[in-house]
Image (cartoon, grey):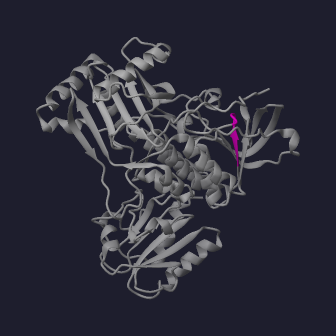
Amino acid sequence: MHQPTTQPRPSIYYPYEVFQPWLPSQHGAQPRQKVVIVGSGPAGMVTALELARHGVASVVLSAELQFSQGSRAIVFTRRSMEILQQVGVAERMTEGGLPWRFGNSYYRGQRVFRMEAPHDDDDRFFPMLNVQQQYMEHYLHDACAASPLIEVRWGNKVLGVTQREGYAEVLIDTPEGEYTLESDWVVDASGGRSAIRTAMNLQMEGASYEGFFVIADIRIDLPLPTERLAFFDPEWNPGNTILMHREPHGIWRVDYQLPEGETPEEALRPESLKARIDAQLAMIGHAGTPWEMDWSSVYSARTLTLPDFVHGSVIFTGDAAHLLPIFGVRGANTAFQDAQSLGWHLAYVVKGLAGPRLLASHSAERVGAAREIIAESGKSVRFMTPPTRGFRLLRDAVLSLSLQHEFVRPLYHWRTSRPHEYTHSMLNSRGDDNALFTDGPAHGAPPRNIRLAADDYLLDHLGGGFDLLYFTEAGEVPEPIQAVVRQARERGVALRVSAIGHSGPVKGADQSFADADGHFRARYGVRASGAAYLLRPDQHVCARWLTLDAHRLQAALTAALPQ
């Protein structure tokens, strides 16, 4: 029988709660589920919340009885915050988080590069926000608990998945024994050590790197701003790299690369941790400042992905689908994008609004995103942890030259996580005017936010289905376009029409936004009335027109929901 620990995890800043296990004896016969999600981490819970937004119920299985140990993912990007806004937790994240936009790289005591992430008045969220993962999981769980469409079963460990014709059987162990749960779909969000992926003998593509990093969270009072700090080839750790981040609740994250040949077990000895952290504090001018350890771990950089995320009735997402290095804050941030994409693709298949090709599109899009991240992050990994003597010589040459020559300093850039653009998605309209636009978000890109008032933004009003942004100076959306919208809704497709430009209500539109100064039109590259954008339920652009008519709108909806 599965016996998860009932002792709260140790922490000097987060009060862990131990949840009661879900036990089969306390419930009746189990009906077949629409979706079972294995794993209650960021990918699993956001998938559940996205499915619920589209009206699909799910059961979330967690082998443990509490949230994950340690701060783990701590940096969340603007796009992640926009996704979390859709599932209702962004406000809690910002209340307790630390926003920032600058990163600094140091070599031999000199700052050789300063990264500045873009931020303007149209952005509700900062480029980056630091929040410990336990809090983020806490907020997501509260949102799940508030949804009648989500059931979280704590202390339920999946032992195996057997695929049948059109469904799967999930064998689950609990503190009182095993039971079987049938489900039309199983989402594996169980993380990098996925037992389901291993049992199915699925092989990942990519590379693993030899270097190891220690993560250490310490409580310390440092009079430093909330900015990323990277130190290359320091005297106390020659040839290696150190990273530092401020976290909420008086915690600092210190990441440092291990010398070649040192094992993780050796690195995590208390005396080793103390010596390295003391040396780092001394290097930045804070020798002797008292500190207290909260949590430590070891990780290595891996750039791996499954070539297909959909296997029969089993769909892989998050770290179960790919393993990405944390440099550039790619772990949880990529998982959020995976989950947002999977949520609507799977929901529309479950509801019969599209066929299996829609899930094939999800896999192709997210595998493409993983491969793009691997290509980019591989450059960062090879700079941070040179895998060969040749790469080390090149990296060391950049370090040396950067002391005197500005032209090499941008090579320090850590290539921050950004939303993938589904430029070549099969869901994009082939008969629109995408190629004729000179500005604005193109095929597959997420929308550009617009500040509408002091605390009111465009993305506050979008989401939950398809969004048609129709630019018009008239007081009515043309009747043929309204007819296509009505037909889509009669099929069960959520489609909201937002009119932009007219100063008052627009007949046929669900909401209207004035654009007296033309700022909205400029941000979207629109020059005249009649232009439009169609956004998918994950808000990515699937069509845009300089002039929209009913036939072209219908064609775009048909392409976005293949049968």
Which quarter of the image is occupied by the N terminus? Answer: top right
Q: Residue furthest left?
A: 404
Q: At which x and y percent is residue 231?
A: 29, 29
Q: Does residue 98 belong to the magenta stretch?
A: no
Q: Position of residue 309 (x, y in %)?
A: 55, 40
- Of residues 132 and 195, the one drawn nearer to the viewer in this rendering: 132
Nearer to us in this view, 393 or 206: 393
Q: With respect to residue 378, does 491 lie above or below? A: below
Q: Is residue 62 magenta?
A: yes
Span colored in magenta: 59-65
Between residues 234 and 82, which one lies in front from this camera angle? 234
Q: What's the residue at 21%, 26% (across, down)?
A: 108
- Is residue 429 at all visible to an observer of this figure? no
Vertical comparison of 500 with 266: above or below: below
Q: Is residue 492 left or right of residue 136?
A: right
Q: How many marks?
A: 0
| Quadrant in the rendering for residue 501 | bottom left
Q: Position of residue 329 (x, y in %)?
A: 41, 40
Residue under the point 53% across and 51% down: 341
Asked if residue 160 lies left or right of residue 546, the reply is right
Is 109 on the left-hand or right-hand side of 156?
Answer: left
Indicate left or right for 466 with 220 as reference.
right
Inspect this view and state whether residue 16 appears. yes
* Front residue of this view, candidates 58 and 535: 58
- Residue at 37 percent of width and 34 percent of height: 244
Q: Is residue 61 above or below residue 95?
A: above
Instruction: Name which quarter of the figure residue 392 lies in.
Output: top left
| Residue lying at 44% horizontally and 86% vertically, measured from the top left | 504
Q: Horizontal and vertical percent for residue 102?
A: 30, 45
Quadrant position of the C terminus in the picture: bottom right
Q: Residue furthest top?
A: 261
